[in-house]
Amino acid sequence: MKTILTGIRPTGHLHLGHYFGAVGNWAKLQNEYETFIEIADVQALTDNFNDPDKVRKSVNNLTIDLLSIGIDPNKAHIFIQSLIPEIAELTVFYSNLVTISRLERNPTVKTEIKQKKELFGEQGESITYGFLGYPVSQAADITAFKGNLVPVGDDQLPLLEQCREIVRKFNSIYGETLLEPEAYLSKFPRIKGIDGNEKMGKSLGNAIYLADSDEEVKNKVMSMVTDPEKIKVDDKANPNICMVYYYHKLIGNENLHNICEECKKGQRGCVACKKELLEKLLEFLKPVHEKQEYYSKHPEEVEKILKDGTSIAREKAKETMKEVKKAMKIDYFK
Ligand code: ATP
Ligand code: MG
């Protein structure tokens, strides 16, 4: 059986971008693969080191969200990154195999640095050694579990390429030990934000969260960016630049063809269109909210799921570590 390793940073709740871009896939893939899902608290701390409360709280919230969208703890192992010290060890070993300029050239890291500057200004947090190095730690995450497949959104592709390079370099120096993983993309590998930004992101303030109340969802849908040329209700508009149409498509509205035609012909007002979308979204979110409520009331179940998942993950990482140390000739005192 092939192994899936994927992860999520505990920096907030799950949003629709996660669900349609990556996490929704995990719920399907868990039936076919041995699945490890990492709650990447160490990675979250690289740029949230000054907000430990947020990271701690998000570990629980995220786990609840994952269970609420159909991750089955009997099939998938949900585990906490910081409880697997082998990942930190591997990160140190791999850090010799990556140049600083290569990390600085990584397109995902570059975009994230740019976004941080836009959000906090040039005077904001400067980029730390830990943040620049997170792709190395991510390579450790994947290889510790011998992940073959990594189901992610397309913002992660450069990080996966970085991991593959590290694996090749490691194997060429120390002998065939590590597996080169492959990305697995969803049908919509990058979900846009409600503001029209190319990516819906926790750090970007443009997300609809699976934990949002009906009222919050309503406010967000009503504020979605539409065709700016459409002023009056019967103006013709271009659905392809409208976020409301975009989410109708994403949620799989069976009325999509009509929505598109009516919008183009000026037969559909934006408010009515938004109300229809809201209805669909709330219908989608209802069972998710019910499960979130259940798990929020049963924290002991959530804790047990994390403990069990972490213990299975640790065993697997220990096996890999033995092989790595042997290959690197640092397997002392047998
Ligand atoms: P942060 O801003 O803290 O990095 P994030 O919203 O980018 O948060 P991550 O935890 O970094 O979330 O990503 C978890 C997974 O979800 C990754 O596989 C990532 O590719 C995917 N993902 C996140 N946002 C999107 C999106 N807008 N479209 C598609 N996939 C996404
Ligand atoms: Mg991210």
Image (cartoon, grey):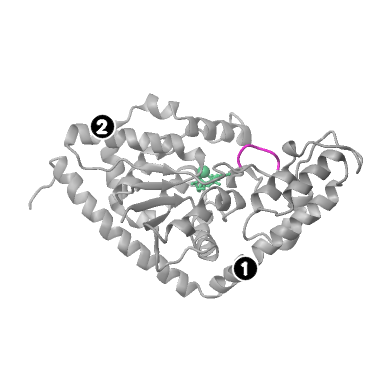
Amino acid identity at mark 2? Lys
Inter-mark Cα distance, 2 to 1: 46 Å
| x 67%, y 59%: residue | 212
Q: Residue at x 17, y 36 (%)?
A: 174
| Count of numbered circles in the view | 2
Q: Is residue 167 left or right of residue 283?
A: left
Query: Is residue 204 left or right of 90 when viewed as pictured?
Result: right
Above or below for 125 versus 332: above
Q: Residue at x 74, y 47 (%)?
A: 257
125 or 325: nearer the viewer? 325
Q: Position of residue 235 (x, y in %)?
A: 89, 38
Label 1 sits on a secondary structure element that is helix
Per the rendering, the mark at residue 163 is none
Q: Is residue 212 magenta?
A: no
Residue 169 is labelled as: 2
Secondary structure of the residue carrying tag 2 is helix
Pointer 2 or 1: first along the chain? 2
Dot 1: within a 10 Å radius of its alpha carbon, few (fewer than 14), some, or many (20 or more) residues? few
Task: Please tell me the numbered disc located at residue 287.
Answer: 1
Q: Report the magenta residues as a range.
A: 195-199
Residue 278, x across and y down, in percent: 75, 57
Q: Position of residue 25 (x, y in %)?
A: 50, 53
Quadrant for the N terminus in the image? bottom left
Residue 208 in view (yes/no): no
